[in-house]
Amino acid sequence: MWSVLDQALFAGANFVVNVLLARWLSPEAYGAYTVAFTVFLLFSTLHQGMLTEPMLVFGPGRFKDRLPAYFGTLLRGHLGVSAIGFAVLGAGALGTWAFGGPLALTVGLLAIAIAQGGILLTWLTRSMQYVTFEPQRSAVAGAIYAVLLLGGVAALYAAGVIGEVESTDVLLAVGVTGAAGLLSGLWLVRRGGLWPLPTPEAEVVREARAQHVEYGRWAVASGGLDWVAGYLPIMWLSLAGGLAEAGGLRALYNFALPAVHVFQVLGTLMVPTFVKALEGGTGRRTLGALTALAVVLAGIYGAVLLVAGAPALSLIYDGKFDAYADLMWAVALVPVGIGVVVVLLSCLRAMERPRQLFWARIVALVLTVAPLALLGGVTTARAALLTIVAISLASALAMGIDALRHLGTSGASGPDSASGDGPQSPPPASGDGAGHAHTPEATGEPRLPLHSASPIPPPEAEPWT
């Protein structure tokens, strides 16, 4: 309950702000804002893979009796990664300016270089609340974030400073997001008793570094592939079609997000469902039922978009993106692909097959991106939307073949702990949804992910929310 509220507050606030910015900003400024955040998300895979994801694995188990020192070590690591982010994204802004790129994009990259530390802080500290099984605290932080973000954007618009100069618009939009993340993250640090930072313990630092680096290598690689699968079309489009076309794509994609968020929430419930099904030998039947459910839900939502999407597009954006109304059919296909991927992703994670997830993404990208490159790339919003759908369906095909092969005709009896695929990444920790830890030592169950049951980054993490 609290985790759903937590996700709803962050995702809802970001969704509303994105719709408002699409309405208030020029297509070029909105495109620059989207591209700047997309570049930031590529860097964020390092932070997520090296800090947040391993923390969800090792925090409730290996470090459960040393959490203050462990969290302090991670917060210091956050400062180091944020410094790297400032340098890398700042260099990107400098390079964009040096090569004559759009001023709005240059300013956007510089702004995100400054703001990324605050945004990443709130992601990390929110996840800490799940390690300590206090999601209600994260939900309160979500409310703080929502009030600051929505209130800040509304105040800027009321003051008449948004919608005048493209570069200023992008700077302010990114700045408000960074400030909201920083303040909500600092609140969690204080409420968690982590300020001032706990004194470092050499043994904890050494052990955490070794475990996080070992786990993070796969996590960062997988995160990078997820970024390519989810965000390559927008980057390709911004280069080949321009920022205005990228802004149009983002405005269209907003209409797919309600369904995407529903699947994200369902994904967190599907992993334990698959674990129970695998233990009971009904994995194949459960996979079929949940896949059918995803297709039906996505189909219903798609039908609504086909009927009401075009009028809603004109109404919400005040006619600014009416030229894209004939692409609503492509938007309606997006939830279908993502819904099926969420089901298969949850199934393979329950089977503890991270290598298969990695290679499935590789196969999907080879099947889709390579032909696109030969055909000239992504130059229109239509092509970008169809690319997103194609990557999702190719991922589903690759994952589905592996899942069905492993399940066989009678279902699997449990996680694939001895599949002969070589070393596997340590599976993450889980809870029962009521605040009680489920560790392998206590229950004999495999560790499951808390936040990562979706094919795209957490909703608060991405500009697509």
Image (tube, grey):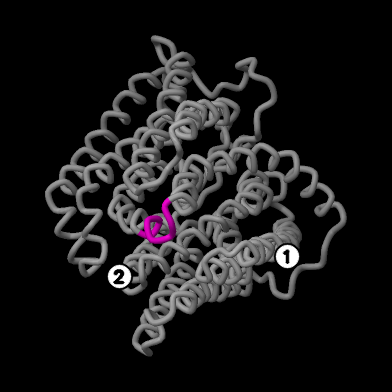
Task: Residue at 61%, 47% (x, y): give it.
Answer: 53
Q: Left or right of 305: which side holds 370?
A: right
Q: Look at the image and tell me in which quarter the C terminus lies.
A: bottom left
Q: Secondary structure at mark 2?
A: helix
Q: Quadrant of residue 287?
A: top left
* Image location of residue 221, percent across then percent down: 64, 39
**Vertical relation: 452 (above or below) 12:** above
Q: Tell which of 48 and 350 is nearer to you.
A: 48
Q: Quadrant of residue 447?
A: top right
Q: Amino acid at mark 1?
A: Ala
- Let me know if residue 18 is in the magenta part: no
Q: Is residue 75 visible?
A: no
* Image location of residue 220, percent across then percent down: 64, 43
Crowd class of label 2 (few under 14; some 14 to 19; many from 20; radius 10 Å) = many
- Let me know if residue 243 is in the magenta part: yes
Span of residues in magenta: 241-247
* Image location of residue 34, percent across then percent down: 45, 60
* Image location of residue 336, percent across then percent down: 30, 37
Would you name the residue on which mark 2 appears? Answer: 23
Q: Amino acid at mark 2?
A: Arg
Would you name the residue on which mark 1 appears? Answer: 83
What is the chief secondary structure element of the magenta stretch? helix
Instruction: Work out which residue is located at the far right of the displayed protein and give it.
Output: 202
Label 2 near label 1: C-beta < 8 Å? no
Crowd class of label 1 (few under 14; some 14 to 19; many from 20; radius 10 Å) = some
Q: Left or right of 460: which side holds 297?
A: left
**Vertical relation: 465 (above or below) 449:** below
Q: Look at the image and tell me in which quarter the N terminus lies.
A: bottom left
Kindly report which numbered mark, 1 or 2, lies closer to the viewer in this rendering: 2
**Vertical relation: 190 (above or below) 412:** below
**Vertical relation: 446 (above or below) 415:** below
Task: Residue at 46%, 69% (x, y): give it.
Answer: 140
